[in-house]
């Protein structure tokens, strides 16, 4: 029994939301039932996905729960799925956040409810698919499929300038991924395979003709697609627009999971397939990451809009991930993988909190608030807790990853570590300042006195995020021990290169 | 050589005979029927004719070989295009049921002309002799000239018809001139003989000119730049189902002829000629489409661009190029006929709702229709699991294998531009509030079937492209002898 579940678990986890979405199409338009059904499906998927970490063989390197079946013979496409420690936790992160998204959208979405949850579930399938696919074609397919539901979520359910934001989001990502497609096609033309493992073996052994001259371009092809998604400075301009206009659930998934597609892609493909090119390009990528950290933080500081503050804080935090990845140190990579998860939980939580206040006041402007701690004490408590985890307070989840990344970067080159560390200070500045302006002091606007505190449903959405922030901060090893072997595998070629440099 | 045609000859011509007979039946029973009820009956007869022709094609597939003094050949290539053309005709007829009623067009010859057009297009794909190809081309063209003018009460439709006719006859004259020069260069009009001559001897200058002139004629038919100027005007004026027909079936047939001339007869100077035209078509088509507000014009420019993508396959090596082009034609037919079916339903009486603005809010008012059109548009963009993706994929990878990197880069960049204008339509449908009241009627059965067929074909080609591609690849083996 267990054995057969191991083989099919990834397929199940990936496609259960899609099946739910298809069933939803035939539902009558009774909004309550539709919400409830979406919640049940997403919870079911979460429970299923817990199978992954429970039965994960932490001692083994390589991919687990693999399925590999021929799908299309020409071109040679396989239905190949599998996860390692990094992608496994990203899958669980996705299934963890989706039920929370359903809860948080319970009342805020009242028009076209059915379509909303259909899109949300389709998006979940696409996101999980990105993390589980090991066939480059399959990966590309899931990658592109995230675009359509996300763009529709922003464009149909978003706020004022939603159409502009949706189109910008779509075009940015779509055009950038064409470069990746070109690189994938080149690899396919030379190796006759889309399979990640096969291609990896081929690039490592140097069997591919012209690889030396084409390698840098291929690296860039992948990198641009991922850099736009992360986003790395200067490709970040779509992100604040998309976040500000998106509905809450869209923002949660966008910040929580979609951005990680970019960093995950860098980890899996840029580092996995092109270690040499990654090494030679690392210097400017790290500089861009540092610019992202500091620039994102500085811009966040002056934003008058809560959601924009959180959006720019994402740019800053994701800069840490990129910094860690391209430090090529064990600490840096483990930290980067950990930030991906921690940022998903804490920023997802912050966006939920922003959405809760928007539901009550229909604005994100910080100046509209002030003294909120008096009418909404529980809300203020949750906000401070999750904000502190995002700031990187020790014992909460943000701290672990940033600490690991910074020590990794420091080992690579001290100046990187020092500059990166300022980012931590900035993030404390802008978030605490925002907190002060929104919650402390006297109530400045009369309407805010009458705001109701969190409802039971909202608490149900926030508790898991808060608990997770604490658990990840106290017991990071639960996560890191699965991530470590994957990081070790990814770093093997770099260690080899380093020894080559030293040897002669 | 036998001077009297044998039974085998007639089998090789069976689908055309079936189509022609049904076409004549439609014409003959039209006056006998009650004016008000005739449409449905005639349409059904025509539909049965198409299905019978598909049956005849499948029957014919068991007897491959030459017929009528080596003028036509039944092989996997011709079977492929016969099925494609007749299937497209059937879908268009299904779409027309509703259209003719809404537009109050009463004309029995409409369905007859579609069938006669299909005769010509089918013959184009099985003819292996240039003069017969020319005759088939004329049969198909004349039907489409008339079909383009069927909205008789609208000046724009007559303009379309006349424009198409004048420029079209000009173009066929070029083709005929090319045939004559080819005959002068090689001493034959049979593709097989031409191939033998061109392969064995040094190629005479005359052959280059001949190929170029024939290409001009066919380039007009497939709406490739710089012979594309008629396309937007004609597509705008012609009835929408006819545009769905014109933009797919005759195009497929003309490309079939082009495949024969370029690959089977080893046309000289192929790569550079095609390189330029393909790059030009993609670029002009896509840039033109960017500024269109009329959906029919937008799709007209998009069809020019798609002709460009298709031509990329012609510059590639035959091994990959031929199957890629055939696959592209099949998936383009599926998605484009489907898109025009939606447009012809939505246009309403007199086709007055065809601007982008009229489509705003379609996502709420008719979710099913909007979702269907979205899938066709996504396929036209080339998003995975739709036929359009693999179509582009095969074409570009074929070109890459022939080391046409420059052309592929132009193509990929064009696909990025193209995404913008298709998305505009999707955005309008889902994200904008309607500016004026546009009526939405329920989807009738005939149109529903047509949409379902196109949708299933589009998705099928996107999920399991293998079988169609493998079938198309058999042609390569047959021609490589």
Image (tube, coloured by chain):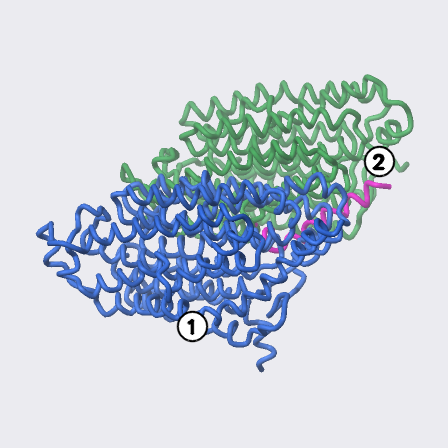
Question: What is the secondary structure assignment of the residue under circle 2?
Answer: loop
Note whether residue B85 is visible: no
Image coordinates of residue B398 in percent, x first then y, are 70, 40
Which residue lies under the disc numbered 2?
B69
Q: Which residue is pictured at 42% across the width and 43% down the height?
A: A169
Front residue of this view, candidates B41 and B166: B166
Front residue of this view, candidates A30 and A43: A43
Q: The green chain is which one?
A: B
Tell me if A350 is positioned left or right of B154 in this view: left
The residue at the far bottom in this view is: A1
Give the answer, above or below, for where A348 lies relative to B125.
below
Front residue of this view, candidates A86 and B36: A86
Give the answer, above or below, for where A255 lies relative to A23.
above
Q: Which chain is blue?
A: A
Which residue lies under the disc numbered 1?
A44
The magenta region covers: B458-481
Note whether residue A423 is visible: yes
């Amino acid at each position: 029994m267990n054995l057969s579940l191991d083989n099919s678990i990834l397929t199940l986890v990936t496609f259960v939301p899609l099946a739910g979405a298809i069933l939803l199409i035939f539902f009558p338009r009774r909004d309550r039932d539709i919400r409830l059904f979406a919640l049940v499906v997403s919870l079911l998927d979460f429970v299923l996905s817990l199978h992954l970490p429970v039965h994960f063989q932490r001692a083994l390197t390589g991919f687990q729960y693999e399925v590999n079946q021929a799908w299309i013979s020409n071109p040679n496409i396989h239905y190949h799925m599998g996860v390692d420690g990094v992608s496994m936790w990203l899958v669980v992160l996705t299934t963890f956040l989706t039920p929370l998204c359903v809860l948080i959208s319970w009342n805020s979405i009242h028009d076209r409810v059915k379509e909303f949850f259909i899109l949300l579930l389709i998006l979940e399938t696409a996101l999980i698919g990105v993390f589980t696919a090991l066939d480059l074609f399959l990966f590309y397919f899931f990658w592109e499929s995230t675009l359509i539901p996300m763009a529709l979520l922003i464009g149909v359910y978003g706020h004022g300038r939603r159409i502009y934001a949706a189109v910008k989001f779509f075009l940015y990502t779509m055009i950038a991924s064409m470069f990746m497609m070109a690189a994938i096609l080149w690899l396919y033309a030379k190796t006759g395979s889309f399979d990640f493992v096969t291609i990896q073996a081929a690039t490592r052994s140097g069997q591919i003709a012209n690889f030396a001259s084409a390698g840098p371009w291929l690296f860039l092809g992948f990198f641009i697609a991922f850099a736009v998604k992360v986003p790395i400075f200067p490709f970040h301009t779509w992100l604040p627009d998309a976040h500000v206009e998106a509905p809450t659930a869209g923002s949660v998934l966008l910040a929580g999971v979609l951005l990680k597609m970019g960093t995950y892609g860098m980890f899996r493909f840029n580092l996995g397939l092109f270690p040499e090119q990654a090494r030679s390009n690392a210097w400017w990528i790290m500089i861009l990451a540092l610019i992202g950290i500091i620039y994102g933080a500085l811009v966040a500081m002056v934003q008058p809009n809560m959601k924009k503050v959180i959006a720019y804080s994402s740019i800053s935090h994701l800069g840490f991930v990129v910094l860690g990845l391209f430090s090529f140190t064990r600490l840096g990579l483990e930290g980067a993988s950990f930030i991906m998860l921690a940022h998903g939980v804490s920023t997802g939580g912050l966006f939920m909190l922003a959405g809760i206040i928007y539901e009550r006041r229909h604005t994100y402007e910080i100046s509209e608030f002030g003294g909120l701690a008096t009418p909404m004490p529980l809300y203020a408590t949750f906000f401070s807790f999750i904000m502190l985890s995002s700031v990187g307070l020790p014992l909460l989840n943000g701290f672990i990853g940033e600490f690991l990344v910074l020590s990794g970067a420091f080992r690579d080159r001290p100046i990187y570590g020092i500059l990166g560390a300022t980012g931590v200070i900035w993030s404390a500045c802008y978030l605490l300042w925002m907190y002060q302006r929104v919650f402390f002091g006297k109530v400045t606007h009369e309407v805010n006195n009458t705001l109701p505190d969190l409802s039971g449903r909202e608490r149900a959405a926030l508790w898991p995020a808060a608990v997770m922030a604490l658990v990840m901060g106290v017991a990071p090893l639960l996560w890191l021990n699965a991530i470590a072997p994957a990081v070790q595998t990814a770093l093997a070629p770099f260690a080899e290169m380093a020894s080559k440099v030293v040897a002669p | 050589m036998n001077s009297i045609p044998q039974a085998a000859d007639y089998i090789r011509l069976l689908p055309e005979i079936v189509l022609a007979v049904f076409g004549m039946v439609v014409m003959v029973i039209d006056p006998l029927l009650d004016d008000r009820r005739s449409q449905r009956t005639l349409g059904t007869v025509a539909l049965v004719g198409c299905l019978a022709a598909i049956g005849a094609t499948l029957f014919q597939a068991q007897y491959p070989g030459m017929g009528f003094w080596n003028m036509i050949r039944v092989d996997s290539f011709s079977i492929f295009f016969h099925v494609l053309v007749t299937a497209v005709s059937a879908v268009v007829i299904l779409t027309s049921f509703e259209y003719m009623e809404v537009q109050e067009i009463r004309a029995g010859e409409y369905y007859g002309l579609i069938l006669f057009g299909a005769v010509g297009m089918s013959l184009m794909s099985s003819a292996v002799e240039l003069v017969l190809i020319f005759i088939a081309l004329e049969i198909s063209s004349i039907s489409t000239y008339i079909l383009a003018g069927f909205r008789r009460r609208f000046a724009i439709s007559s303009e379309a018809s006349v424009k198409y006719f004048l420029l079209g006859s000009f173009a066929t004259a070029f083709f005929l001139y090319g045939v004559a020069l080819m005959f002068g260069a090689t001493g034959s009009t049979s593709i097989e003989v031409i191939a033998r001559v061109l392969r064995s001897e040094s190629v005479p200058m005359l052959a280059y000119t001949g190929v170029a002139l024939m290409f001009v004629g066919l380039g007009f038919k497939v709406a490739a730049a710089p012979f594309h100027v008629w396309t937007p005007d004609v597509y705008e004026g012609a009835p929408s189902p006819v545009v769905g027909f014109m933009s797919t079936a005759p195009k497929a047939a003309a490309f079939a002829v082009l495949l024969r001339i370029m690959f089977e007869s080893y046309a000289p100077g192929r790569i550079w000629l095609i390189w330029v035209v393909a790059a030009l078509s993609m670029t002009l088509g896509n840039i033109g489409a960017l500024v269109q507000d009329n959906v029919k014009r937008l799709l007209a420019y998009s069809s020019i661009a798609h002709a460009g993508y298709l031509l990329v396959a012609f510059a590639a090596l035959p091994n990959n190029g031929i199957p890629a082009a055939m696959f592209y034609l099949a998936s383009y037919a599926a998605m484009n006929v489907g898109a025009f079916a939606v447009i012809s339903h939505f246009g309403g009486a007199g086709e007055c709702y065809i601007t982008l603005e009229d489509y705003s809010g379609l996502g709420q008012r008719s979710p099913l229709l909007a979702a269907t059109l979205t899938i066709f548009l996504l396929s036209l963009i080339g998003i995975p699991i739709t036929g359009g993706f693999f179509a582009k994929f095969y074409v570009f990878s074929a070109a890459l294998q022939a080391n046409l990197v420059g052309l592929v880069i132009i193509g990929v960049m064009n696909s990025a531009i193209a995404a913008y204008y298709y998305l505009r339509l999707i955005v309008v449908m889902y994200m904008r509030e309607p500016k004026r009241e546009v009526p939405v009627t329920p989807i009738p059965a005939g149109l529903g079937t047509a949409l379902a067929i196109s949708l299933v074909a589009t998705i099928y080609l996107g999920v399991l492209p293998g079988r169609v591609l493998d079938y198309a690849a058999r042609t390569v083996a047959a021609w490589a002898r």
